[in-house]
Image: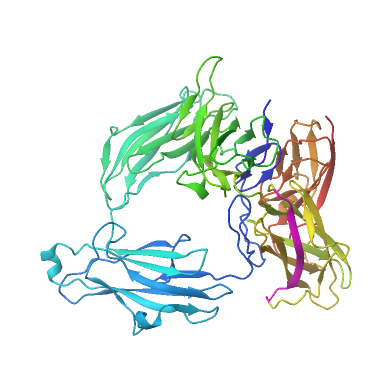
Amino acid sequence: MRMMSRVAVAEGRDVGVSIRGKAEGSLRRALSALTVLVASACGGDSFSQGSKPQFEVAVEGAIVTSVLEGLHEFQKVQPGTGQRQKAEITLRNNGTAPVTISRVTQLDVNADGTAKSKWMVLDWRGFDPALGLPLTIAPGDSPLKIDMVYEPGAACEAENNCESSATIEILTDDPAVPKAVIEFALPKCRREPKVYPPSDIFLEAEVGKPEIKTFTVENSGTCACTVNSVKMVGGANVFTLTQDFADGTELKPNASPVSFTVTYTSAGGAGTDQTQIQVEFDCQSQPTIIPITTQAAQAGNFEVSYDEKETKGFLDFTTVAPSTCEEKVVSIYNVGPAIMTVQTREVPEDLQGNFYTVTCAFPPAQEGAEPTPVTGNAALAAGRTLECTVKYCATDAAGKNGTLTIAYVNPGPGTIEVPMFGGTPKPCFDFGPGDVSSQMALDFVATAKGEAVDGRFMIYNCGNADLEVKAVRVEDAFGQGEASEYFTVDAALAFPLTVPVGGVQSVELTMVVNDNEPQVSSTMYIDYVDGSGATLVASNMNVRGFVAPTVPVIAAALEASGEKKVGKELTLSGAASTPASEIGEGAYAFYLVDKPAGSQLIINGSPGDATRDIIPDKAGKYVFALRVFAKTEPYIWSPEATVEVDVTE
């Protein structure tokens, strides 16, 4: 029997002994709330801190990528004519502590391996780097601005170096981003194959009357790209693929597209037929996937489970001795009805594979047979399983924490994230309703001035060490650090709070509006301690209050159905929430309020569909909650609805 455990699923995260994932719709209507700033959650090795530098580089106003490695392209100019181009480089500090720029260097060998071009030079705008560096920029100080200038002389053609590039390296004392690397070059070779449409639905086919769809393949880049193959996965009895070009056809930039057709021959009946077209290019590591169905695309269901050795909410490698290795298996089972394609499998914190390696295979079809290794995309029909083995080697005493990240299409794109701990045990912070990646507000609705309205949110520990919450602060919404005059935290709570591994802690808030404001807003901050002992601001959430709203208040309704036993599936449904016409699409936020001792189950995530499937792992009382979001003004979250479920062995 497989023991289920915790995963995080993009567009809705469920944590527990089993997860049944769904490709859920996100909350599409913008909330009328302040932007929620969040810290990094489970699975990483670093967290955002309350006071820190934040070094940022922008080229011509465009911020360089988060890893501070960027490319700026100049346009070609006629050499020797005095034509020149200039790119402004801005170095600034957006943090709350000083940052020191120690060095800005134009490298002798560029990022592409070419020699430094004498036609691309730094213009310091009168700043003398020999005297001015190191340069400390305090929060709020003016940024340092310099220019990269491209002006090819007439001699560049004779020297055959008009195409040369330049690379600058910027060193700082910011531990989060100690080095920035920016490359400047003329337009480079880009291969950008596209298949259109990216998906399609057959709606007009009848028995004896096939329907045909045409798909075009083109290259909008600047260099040629080859179509290696076009394959159909599933549905061969009712779908037919026809190409008007041969495999190995070269697509030249902006040339006329080639095409293929898919013919659907209906066999009758009310069922849904589905297939996938996978187009492989020599310029892409993964095929382009075209989902095709005979009706509106349905969200596929899947389960992620760990092997029988795991009953925790993560993969725990903290007991692996130095210089030894251990393996654990993560299985993905496609419940259906959609075909599920598992794409990349990686550990972003360890891309070099110094600690973690991941290999996947289809299990044997019959006893005595061997597994079938999978290195590329894995198309899972309904009822099929993919098993991924994670091998962790303790290559040094410090170890490494990471996240097994699996991209999939089912039929829409999504991501599965499995926390893995190989370094020092540490807590993992999450809160409900919503999670640290959701832009949700905690809403309170009073019918009259002076009425006290209670509400709550939940703190979850999804890590492998106790979580210490030092404080919950509700401050005014203008960032002045003053306590809110409208919202107070339950005085009975004794901080610091300790939330055990897999634990859940309820925090009560009370709103009272005594003035004549019809709508008030504050910001809630949660301070907690990470595994290294540093105090972090885990998140801040917009807390809003409405007094005597002018529109009817939406009401959440929550029901639970299914066999109420350990290991059996329960379905949580908010379909009875009212009025249905006022509830936004993908606007149902489920979360866990209480559970029996020893349970690792945590139900939480971004707002999604009206149902959520879970599997309890311990006998006892579970309490689940739901809030729903209005799709018209004043765009508020409903009060909390709960349901209690008694689970038996």
Position of residue 554 in the picture relative to residue 229 (left or right) = right
Magenta-colored stretch includes residue 472: yes
Query: Magenta segment, principal secondary structure?
Result: strand
**224 or 425: nearer the viewer:** 425
Q: Which residues are magenta?
A: 465-479
Report which quarter residue 601 is drawn in: top right
Report which quarter residue 109 is drawn in: bottom left
Quadrant location, the C terminus = top right
Position of residue 378 in the picture relative to residue 308 (left or right) = left
Report which quarter residue 121 is drawn in: bottom left
Magenta-colored stretch includes residue 532: no
Q: Residue at x 85, y 64 (%)?
A: 490
Position of residue 296 in the picture relative to residue 259 (left or right) = right
Q: Is residue 249 above or below residue 170?
A: above
Q: Residue at x 61, y 57 (%)?
A: 40
Quadrant location, the N terminus = top right
**320 or 174: nearer the viewer:** 320
Q: Can residue 501 be seen at all in this image of the molecule?
A: yes
Q: Position of residue 547 (x, y in %)?
A: 81, 69
Q: Residue furthest left?
A: 158
Q: Position of residue 99 (x, y in %)?
A: 51, 74
**563 or 577: nearer the viewer:** 563
